[in-house]
Amino acid sequence: MLDEFGCYWLGDEIPDVCSVSLMPEADRAAGRMVRRHGERASEVAVLLREMAADRSHPLFEPIAEGTLIWWTDDDPSWAKFQQVADRIADQITSALAGSLANRPNS
């Protein structure tokens, strides 16, 4: 997950995270997570939900340092992170549920 944020969620490229829709980026991030991690992407979904519920989660510091986006510094940024995290987690969960439904019975 840190690689995802460090590569695709850069403050230089998203200068005002609060004023733009990040849902397309969140959807692409979820897809990358599922392709890269397969069923283990569900662990990323759990982690993102934990982070969205805990503004003091220890992973925010390395994410901020790697992206130059301080998601927890103010209420609008925090709300945007929660929205993005929930979307990524939901998309991962949905993709994994779809892939499990499409598997042949063992």
Image: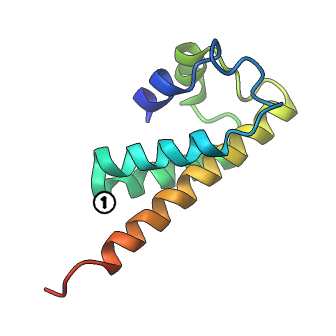
Residue 19: horizontal and vertical position, in percent?
83, 30
Residue flagged by tag 1: what amino acid is it?
Glu
In the figure, residue 3 lies in which quadrant?
Answer: top left
Quadrant into which the N terminus falls: top left
Horizontally, is 48 left or right of 44 in the view? right
Residue 64: horizontal and vertical position, in percent?
61, 19
Q: Residue at x 32, y 75 (%)?
A: 100
Question: In this view of the protein, which residue sits in the foreground, 33 or 71?
Answer: 33
Q: Residue at x 39, y 45 (%)?
A: 33
Question: In this view of the protein, which residue sits in the foreground, 69 or 62?
Answer: 69
Mark 1: give few (<14), some (14-19) or many (20+) Cα within 10 Å: some
The residue identified by callout 1 is: 39
Mark count: 1
Q: Residue at x 54, y 55 (%)?
A: 89
Q: Please, which residue is most extreme toward the front here? A: 24
Horizontally, is 99 left or right of 75 in the view? left
Residue 93: horizontal and vertical position, in percent?
48, 64
Residue 97: horizontal and vertical position, in percent?
41, 72
In the image, residue 66 sits, relative to residue 24, either above or below, namely above
